[in-house]
Structure formats: structure tokens, C-alpha cells
Amino acid sequence: MRESDKQMLADHYLDFYQMAYTLLHNKADVEDAVHDALVETMSNPLVTNPYQYCSKVVRNNCRKLLRKEGYMLVEQLPDIPAPEDHLDEERLRMLWDYKNTLPDRIREIFDLYYEQGYSRHKIAEVTNTPMPTLKKLFRKGHERLKKMMKEHEKQHKETR
């Protein structure tokens, strides 16, 4: 691996760390996942695009950890003020819970976009996803969340 590639990976360490943290929410596991990905990327002589390769390895390492039996994912609601569109705390909590039931790929892009503040172009680059596919995943995720919220509201009205 060229020195310029190694420097580029070092420069993007924070990106890899943030991506892993959105999935794992555990500092020790995040550091392990990122470190292992960097070692694998630097030791693989066939890598042509180290940034994309390392991003993919970080995501895969996180997914492996999440699939491990007994892995506990403890998540906290972010400390953000209620939006202006009158979503109360209960609805925000439900939306957060529903987001966590989305498929891994959709949840990952939602985390990168809404929690980490990545642009859609940056998400496409980091996840190695074509932009049309990324737009489709966002649309599917939003549709699923809307459907879940409507079902909840319908059940809530029926119980009154």
C-alpha cells in the first residue's frame, strides 16, 4: 500500500469511527471494529480504493459484532429539542424505536444522515451505494416509518 493511501486512511479515521459508532454505540467495540478494518485494508495488496474498501470492512465488522449472540445494543435518545412540527416526546421516542426496526441497510443510511449529519453524496461514497439506490432506500425507509406511525395512531384512537 502506498504511503499516500495510508495517510488518506489516517485522515479519514474519524469518518470510520463515526460510522461504526452509529451502528454500535459502544466505544470499545467501535475502536476494535475500526482498528481491525484499518489493519485488513493496509495488509491487503489487492485494494484499489482503500477508502471504500475500509468503509465496507468497518460496516461488516460492526454487523458481525451485532450478530454475535448476546451482544447488547444500548441506545439512548439524542438530546435534541422537539421539532417545530409538533412532534411530542412520546412520538419522537416511537419514531426512534421504529427506526431501529428498519432493515440494517436503511437504518445505517438514516443514522449517517440524521444523526451524523452526512450529506447524501457522502453517504453514497462511504457505503459504496449508487445515488439512485440511495434515494430509493431513503424513500422506502420514510414510507415504512410513515406506515408504522399511522398504524400506531390508528391503534391509539381505537383504544380511546
Image (spheres, rainbow, N blue to C red):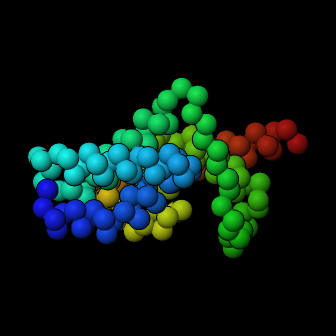
Compare residues 120 and 10 and report the one nearer the observer.
10
| Image location (x, y in percent) of residue 70 | 58, 28
| Image location (x, y in percent) of residue 159 | 85, 38
Which quadrant is the C terminus positioned in? top right
| Image location (x, y in percent) of residue 45 | 12, 47
In this image, 110 relative to 50: left or right? right
Q: Is residue 76 visible?
A: yes
At 39% from the left and 41% from the top, the residue drawn is 61
In this image, 130 relative to 87: left or right? left
State the residue lying farthest toward the bottom. 84
Which quadrant is the N terminus positioned in? bottom left
Compare residues 160 and 1 and report the one nearer the observer.
1
Q: Is residue 23 visible?
A: no
State the residue lying farthest toward the right. 160
Q: Is residue 106 above or below residue 3?
A: above
At 48% from the left and 68% from the top, the residue drawn is 117
In this image, 118 relative to 144: left or right? left
Q: Quadrant of residue 151?
A: top right
At 22% from the left and 52% from the top, the residue drawn is 42
Count every numbered label the image shows and give the total. Answer: 0
Q: Is residue 156 above or below residue 117?
A: above
In this image, 156 relative to 37: left or right? right
